[in-house]
């Protein structure tokens, strides 16, 4: 990873660093990727340009793809069972909620 | 009643559509050719993706400690770590002793 990317201020581990890097790289390349995709999909553009755009898109590094970005738990770094509203995995969410650290979150009863 | 008024020709209807698009500032594409506009229409999600992880604070614990030397700021996390290490050592689970390297090499 040659490009310098700001370090996150939450819990740090390798996976979070990698995901953070991917986010920055994907955001940087997003406009270019969008333009290439547009060229590739546009039927009014000559075929050669469309093929070239598609090839270019395929050869772009994987860390520029928005698909590879994964929401991770900000407290534990877990990649699964992450609630996007709280940016926490289910266990961390449960601990924080029961400690009263999450405003407006209480046990569901109805 | 509809039989009395002739239906306008396809060309006339196209002209109407074209003028209508000019008036309402919409894209004129009567043959529904795929021009990729739907890809340009979507919003970019780069900024939202970057803002997921919080920004690192430029002020760290050591800076506060250095800025206010008269106050005592207990580093609870480090104290906890040291305490756990001491307990492990007591149980005999500390780091193993380093073997002295005499420099002997096997042939």
Image (cartoon, grey):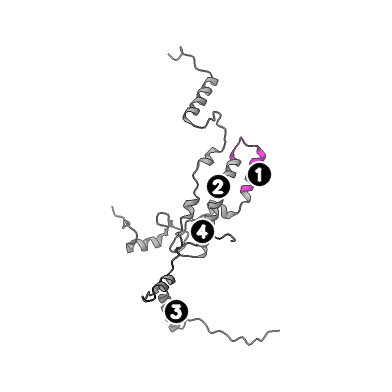
Label 4 belongs to which residue?
Answer: A20
- Which chain is disc 2 placed on? A
The percent position of residue B12, horizontal first and vertical second, equals 53, 20
- Compared with residue B19, is residue B79 higher up or lower down, i.e. above or below? below
Q: Which residue is mark 3?
A: B85
| Helix, strand or loop under label 3 | helix
Q: Which residues are magenta?
A: A41-57
C-alpha gap between disc 2 and disc 3: 50 Å
Between residue B55 and residue B9, name the one nearer to us. B55
Residue that numbered label 1 is attached to: A52
Asked if both marks, 3 and 4, belong to the same chain, the answer given is no
**Label disc, if present, on residue A31 of the rendered structure:** 2
Real-space Cα separation, disc 4 to disc 2, in angstroms: 19 Å
Q: Position of residue A108 (x, y in %)?
A: 31, 55
Could you tell me which secondary element the residue under label 1 belongs to? helix
Q: CA distance from mark 4 to mark 1?
A: 30 Å
Mark 3–mark 4 Cα distance, whole angstroms, equals: 32 Å
Name the residue: 43% across, 66% down. B59
Judge whether A23 appears above or below B40 on screen.
below
Left or right, A93 with respect to B96, comes to left
| Chain of residue at mark 4 | A
Residue A18 is a magenta residue:
no
Marking on residue B33: none
Residue at mark 2 to residue at mark 1: CA–CA distance: 17 Å
């Amino acid at each position: 990873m040659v490009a310098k990317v700001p370090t996150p201020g939450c819990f740090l581990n390798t996976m979070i660093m990698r995901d953070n890097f991917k986010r920055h790289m994907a955001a940087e390349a997003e406009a270019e990727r969008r333009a290439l995709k547009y060229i590739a999909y546009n039927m009014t553009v000559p075929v050669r340009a469309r093929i070239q755009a598609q090839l270019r898109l395929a050869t772009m590094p994987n860390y520029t793809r928005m698909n590879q970005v994964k929401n991770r738990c900000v407290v534990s770094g877990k990649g699964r069972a992450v609630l996007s509203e709280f940016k926490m995995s289910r266990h961390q969410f449960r601990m924080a909620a029961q400690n009263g650290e999450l405003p407006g979150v209480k046990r569901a009863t109805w | 009643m509809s039989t009395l008024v002739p239906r306008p020709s396809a060309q006339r209807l196209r002209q109407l559509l074209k003028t209508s698009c000019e008036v309402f500032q919409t894209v004129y594409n009567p043959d529904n050719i795929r021009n990729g506009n739907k890809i340009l229409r979507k919003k970019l999600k780069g900024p939202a993706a970057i803002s997921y992880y919080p920004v690192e604070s430029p002020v760290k614990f050591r800076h506060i400690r250095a800025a206010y030397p008269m106050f005592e700021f207990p580093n609870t996390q480090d104290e906890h770590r040291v305490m756990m290490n001491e307990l492990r050592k007591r149980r005999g689970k500390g780091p193993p002793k380093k073997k002295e390297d005499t420099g002997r090499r096997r042939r």
